[in-house]
Image (tube, rainbow, N blue to C red):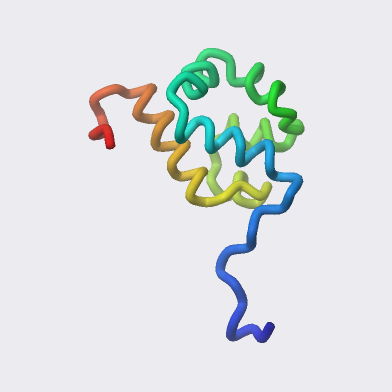
């Protein structure tokens, strides 16, 4: 593929599946999100996230998460859902 047609986004690597599963659960499943908020280390351990993925999740740094293979949409939506849960009434629910 020529430089002219380089993809802006690379598909997540298979090793990032646990990280993306975590982000999807936070984004999509209220009971899962509540469990994560109550015990993030326990949930990350259950899903098998390695130490670097766990550190990236704790930091909340989007660039670090994407560099670890997280899908940018999931990073954005999970962060939004966590913010909505932590700061009720600050954002309109959708």
**Residue at image location 74% in from the left, 49% down from the top:** 14
Return the x and y of residue 80 as percentages of the image width and height: 39, 37
Q: Residue furthest top?
A: 38
Which residue is more in the foreground, 7 or 29? 29
How many numbered discs, if any?
Answer: 0
**Residue at image location 48% in from the left, 49% down from the top:** 73
Return the x and y of residue 23 as percentages of the image width and height: 55, 36
Which residue is more in the foreground, 33 or 65? 33
Determine whether 49 is above or below 12 in the image.
Answer: above
Classify the position of the C terminus by image quarter. Answer: top left
Which residue is more in the foreground, 59 or 67? 67
**Residue at image location 47% in from the left, 19% down from the top:** 31
In which quarter of the view is residue 19 placed?
top right
Name the side, left or right, on which 45 lies relative to 84: right
Name the side, left or right, on which 33 lies relative to 80: right
Return the x and y of residue 1 as percentages of the image width and height: 69, 83
């Amino acid at each position: 593929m020529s430089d002219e047609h380089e993809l802006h986004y690379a598909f997540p690597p298979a090793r990032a599946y646990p990280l993306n599963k975590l982000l999807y659960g936070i984004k999509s499943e209220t009971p899962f999100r509540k469990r994560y908020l109550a015990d993030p280390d326990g949930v990350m351990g259950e899903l098998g996230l390695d130490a670097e993925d766990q550190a990236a999740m704790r930091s909340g740094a989007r660039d670090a998460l994407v560099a670890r293979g997280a899908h940018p949409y999931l990073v954005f939506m999970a962060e939004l859902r966590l913010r909505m849960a932590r700061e009720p009434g600050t954002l309109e629910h959708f």
